[in-house]
Amino acid sequence: MVNAILMQLRDTAVIMGAIALIGLLLQKKSAVDVFSGTVKTIIGFMIFNIGSSAMSAQVTTFATMFNTAFGVQGVVTQVEVATSLALNTYGTEVALVMVLGFIMNMVFAKFTKFKAVFLTGQHFLYFACVLALVFISLGAPFIVTVVLGGVILGFCGAALPSFCQPFMNKLTGAENTIAMGHFNDIGYAVSGYIGKLFSKQHEAELASGSSDDRELPEFFKLFRDFVFSVALFMIVLFYIVTIACFLTGHLVKVPDDPTNVNNVILKAMGNDIWFIWPFLAGLQFAAGMSVLIYGVRQFIAEITAAFVGISEKLIPDAIPAVDCPAIFPFAPNAVILGFIGSFVGGLVAMAVMVALHSPTIMIPAAGICFFSGGTCGVMGYAYGGWRGALLGSFVIGIFLCAGPLVLYPAFSALGITGASFPNVDYNIVGSIIYGIGHLFGA
């Protein structure tokens, strides 16, 4: 009985609910608010798991087909899928790193010059996954993983947004009113500085009265819808691997051998016709992501609200670090240019991996290209106009695709396969920690 209770307490949904419960109690919320917030947190995580299962099933099928058709390991740079895989096995470590990270973010904001309070809770969750996996792969004890992971996460939450602050101030026209709460801050800053290379041309065009705000074709405007972008991109990917499997003879049933890869692929397709299935599979992936994101937003909103309420009382001079879509209205066309630039950069990185015969091929994901690439476009646009938006996002798009190659072997050894964590901050900070760990013989 005791063991059953302890196992239940290791359930990540229960841990998330307990975190929300503690935060709400510390704010002295009413009994109704405490109960409601706790239950909504647990339900939100359960919704997350439903979306996660749907996405993971499609990614597993895609990876099997890609590896079979092309003879290499195809990995989608989809942070949501990688996170769901990590939570399945290491949910306790990830949850505790995230909680301590929230607390340490407030400590660093209170007592250091870094005043950002990170309000994008899902990115705390994603970065907590990366840090927990890095320490686990180094063989660190549970307590070391939680404490060091939480402290580093809290410091990054307070400090990394400062890299982007000059560009945030330029875009908003105000001094330190909001910060960038999205763990691609190093990448955004690099894109912003690339944009500065074109500042003279941009200023000259504005001074002459000519607008460099190019009107985009209607087709590209469709990509402002995130779910549409994901669905279209995954449909294309599924068609590529399905046609490749068809041409290589892997869509022919092998009698009396259920474990044969051909039969595994055909079983995943079910009763759908092979040339219709990719369309439905891409839509299924996008639907799963929609459910997953809804669940993440629900349980993270409750947890973040608890910590925000505390931080407002303790850190009056804090700068709220908000999610990247908050700055999209400042340069909406730059978002699309950034999406295009980062996607092309990702394709270039993938082509180089293929040319170099890399055993692992990272595949750029629509989600990362839209949000992180689009934000790179806005940062590059701040000083450099459309030139800065395109070039800045292109350069960072290469890293978004190729960067995960460094940590992927360590993560795949822990069972996190078929998907990766693409953002720049994850991979730079994670690689530094991993390198230091090996330097000291971990």
Image: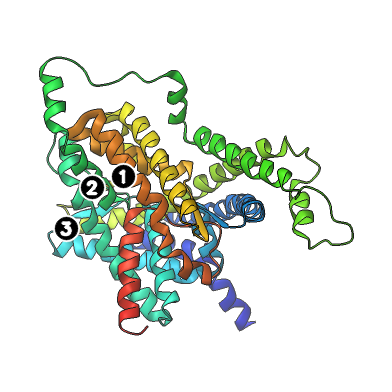
Q: Relative to 316, is 277 above or below?
A: above
Question: Depth-wise, is mark 2 or mark 3 nearer the camera?
Answer: 2
Q: State the CA–CA distance, disc 2 to disc 3.
A: 19 Å
Using a 10 Å C-alpha cutoff, classify the residue at mark 2 as few (fewer than 14 neighbours), some (14 to 19) or many (20 or more). many
Q: Which residue is mark 1?
A: 395
Report the amino acid beneath label 2: Val
Residue 257 falls left or right of residue 264: right
Residue 174 lies left or right of residue 25; in this view the side is left
Compute the Cα span from label 1 to label 2: 9 Å
Q: Give the mark nearer the N terminus: 1 vs 2.
A: 2
Verify CB contact (< 8 Å) between mark 2 and mark 3: no
Q: Is residue 86 visible to the viewer in this orientation of the structure? A: yes
Query: Secondary structure beneath disc 3?
Result: loop
Q: Is residue 112 left or right of residue 119?
A: left
Residue occupying the point 32% across, 28% down? 332
Q: Secondary structure at mark 1?
A: helix
Mark toward the viewer: 1 or 3 = 1
Which residue does the numbered mark 2 point to in the structure image? 190
Residue 101 at what x, y percent from top left? 32, 65
Horizontal and vertical percent position of residue 229: 50, 35
* Label 1 CA crowd tier, 10 Å (few <14, some 14–19, many 20+): many
**Residue that carries the numbered disc 3 in the rendered image:** 114
Residue 77 visible, this angle? no
Amino acid under label 1? Val
Residue for point 20% across, 40% down: 168
Residue kind at label 3, given as amino acid type: Phe
